[in-house]
Amino acid sequence: MSDLRIVNFPHPALRWKSKDVNRIDAQLKNWIAQMFDLMYAARGIGLAANQVGLPYRLFVINPSADPAEKELEQVFINPQIIKRNGSEDAEEGCLSLPEIYGPVTRAERITVEAFDLTGENFAYELGGIHARVVQHESDHLDGVMFTDKISADALVELQPLLDDMTAQMERQQQEGQLASNDELLAELRRLQAERTDG
Ligand code: CO
């Protein structure tokens, strides 16, 4: 597989319910390094594997969005949010929905378990932006986007932008710049079979 790129709504990878990866190897580490590069280039604070067309349960974050702050980088492999407390509204965006923002209600504090790049299991109690980005990225792994969670009123406002993105993707597919949905889905199934047990 060649270099990864961030896919935009409504690419079918963004609706894929990803399965746990069954090994951490050089290929996976290479993809994760590419995900950090793509995230920083797009000035994001989190990026999920679904957003680069990989059907695996993993995401990367750096709440500072600053590649110089390497110590704030975190990789979550096969993450599970095991506890949620409180509730908080805040504006969110998404690298797969450029220029689109809306208010999302999330748990204020969470406990998340995952594996890191070395295969060590860890658990964190998180709050603030850290808790929000982990919830947003975890949703991606289930094929859920933040626009699925905003109010009906907010969605009405954003719908024309989403419709434009759908039209743009259809145009790219008609012009042959992007594979058809059938081909994209076949590739997701192939990648899933390669390194999940699902
Ligand atoms: Co996102």
Image: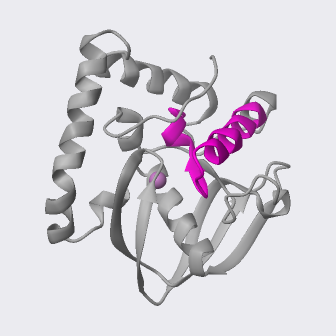
Of residues 190 and 92, the one drawn nearer to the viewer in this rendering: 92
Does residue 143 lie above or below 107 as drawn?
above
Q: Classify residue 185 by image quadrant.
A: top left
- Residue extending farthest to the bottom is 86
Of residues 90 and 60, the one drawn nearer to the viewer in this rendering: 90
- Residue 34 x/y as whole percent: 70, 35
Residue 38 seen in the current view: yes
- Residue 182 x/y as whole percent: 30, 18
Q: Is residue 121 left or right of residue 3?
A: right
As for residue 46 lying within the magenta part, the answer is: yes
Q: Is residue 41 left or right of residue 96?
A: right
Question: Please, which colouring scheme is shown?
Answer: one colour
Of residues 183 and 115, the one drawn nearer to the viewer in this rendering: 183
Does residue 178 lie above or below 73 as drawn?
above
Q: Give the residues in magenta.
A: 29-54
- Residue 107 x/y as whole percent: 46, 81
- Which quadrant, please, contains the N terminus? top right
- Residue 92 x/y as whole percent: 42, 66
Query: In the image, what residue occupies the spot 77% across and 52% down?
Result: 67
